Structures are given as structure tokens and as C-alpha cells.
Amino acid sequence: MPDHFEVILRTVAAFSILLLSAKFLGKQTISQMNIFDFIVTITLGSITASIAYNIDLKPHHTILSFGLFVFIAFLVAYLSTKSRRIRKYFAGDPTVLIQNGKILENNMRKMRYTLDYLNQQLREKDVFDIQEVMFAILEPHGTLSVVKKPQYRPVTRHDLLLHYTPESRIPIELIMDGEIVEKNLKENHLTETWLQMQLENRQLTLKEVVYAVLLANGTLYFDTYNDHILSPVDAE
């Protein structure tokens, strides 16, 4: 077989294997990564690249290595759900960087975390005055969680004793790209007849609607392909 055809076949196979393994390992692998997730992702990517273009390596050897690494990653993830000690070893612990408004320099040094980076992370949390912070915690995957002092926290309707409408569900997508999401209708005991009636009440047809969602407060939101905007801001 010519080399370029072999590379094409190996690349397709490598992509398929990587896609299947990502689905097998779950969403956590592609979310914010801790140290273990980072090692797994880098190694799987390297092995996959070898499968794709290194024709000097036998495909079954690299696939065996890939499969073994996926199994190890899955085993560690499974054991982590069973043991807090294993979970702490592989994922790590959160580290408190600010406590009661005071910077913990020793913890900063242990994490090799600079004041410049701390300020950057605080700004990303809309904190520009460090005096507003009661606790700042560095999570195992590298993001900073911030708890502001009570006097600097946003005011809520509960604080003001204002009336609010209780919500007991997430928004339900009913129409996407002009097509009814039948699965969502069935799961929420809604009918197409009811949806068609809602469209008729708004003088709309199904093909005119790009997106429709039943919001948590019970109201319906419809967005049509024709927005009736003469000068859209995103026009080039």
C-alpha cells in the first residue's frame, strides 16, 4: 500500500479511536483539567499522533498502548470515586490563598503562585480591590474561586425581601433549526398539538422559527430566522 494511503487510513483510524476513548472516559477529561487529566490528555494525543503518521510503528502495537492507557485512566477515575485518598492523590487538594482578607504567602510559595497572577485571576472574577476578598481558593484544576466579604456581595431579591417566581426546572428546548425536538416534548409531557397552537397564537410557522425554548418561569421564547432588524450590528 502506498505510504500516503496508509497515512490517510491511519489518521482516520486514530481520530475514530480518540473520539471513542473521549466518549468512554467522559466529560471530565475535556473540562477543566487537573494534573492527572493533563497527563492523560497529552499522552493520548501523543499516542494518537503516532498511530496517524508514524508508519514505522506497527498499528496494533500503538493501538494496544493506547487501549492500555485508556484503561489505566478509566481505572484511576473509577477508583477515585471509591476512595477519597486516591482522589486526593491524583486530583490534588484546593489551596487557600487568601483567608479573611489576608494573603497566605506560604501557600502562594508552595503553589509557585505570583501576586501578579493572583491579581489577574481576581480581576477575572470582577475583583479589582483585594480588600473585598474574604477567601480565595485555588482549585485543583487551576481556577480561582473567590468569596467576597458580605458587604461587597451582590444584593439579591431575597436580601430585599422582594417577591420572586419559584423555578423547579431548567429551560426546555422545543425547536432547534426549524425542527421540533420531539424527545424534549415527550420527556416533559408536552404535545406537538400544544406547540403548534403556541406557534399559531404568534402567527408563526415551524419553518420560520430557528429556536424556541420553554423557560424555567413558564414563559415561551421564540426566535425567528427573520429578525426584522434593518441594520444588524454583526453585518460585514
Image (cartoon, grey):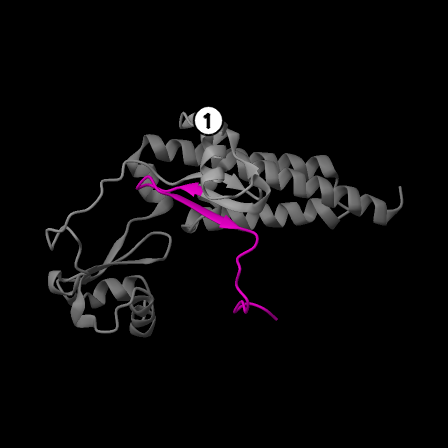
Q: Name the residue rendered at 16%, 71% in the picture.
A: 131
Which image quarter holds the N terminus?
top right
Task: Report x, y in % for residue 114.
Answer: 32, 71
Front in this rendered view, residue 31 or 202: 202
Q: Which amino acid lies under the numbered mark 1 shown in the image of this protein?
A: Thr
Task: Please determine whether, in this image, residue 232 is positioned above or below residue 223.
Answer: below
Task: Report x, y in % for residue 66.
Answer: 61, 39
Secondary structure type for disc 1: loop
Which image quarter holds the C terminus?
bottom right
When asked about the image quadrant of residue 216, the answer is: top left
Q: Main secondary structure of the magenta part?
A: loop
Front in this rendered view, residue 181 or 150: 181
Task: Please determine whether, in this image, residue 135 is positioned above or below residue 15.
Answer: below
Q: Name the residue rendered at 49%, 39% in the picture.
A: 199
What are the residue bounds of the magenta stretch? 213-236
Task: Please determine whether, in this image, residue 34 is positioned above or below residue 126.
Answer: above
* Left or right: where 201 falls relative to 21: left
* Left or right: where 138 falls relative to 45: left
Q: Is residue 217 magenta?
A: yes
Q: Is residue 151 magenta?
A: no
Residue found farthest to the right: 2
Residue 95 showing in the rendered view:
yes
Task: Report x, y in % for residue 112.
Answer: 33, 66
When asked about the image quadrant of residue 78, the answer is: top left
Q: Name the residue rendered at 42%, 51% in the picture.
A: 32
Task: Report x, y in % for residue 150.
Answer: 12, 60
Mark 1 highlights which residue?
191
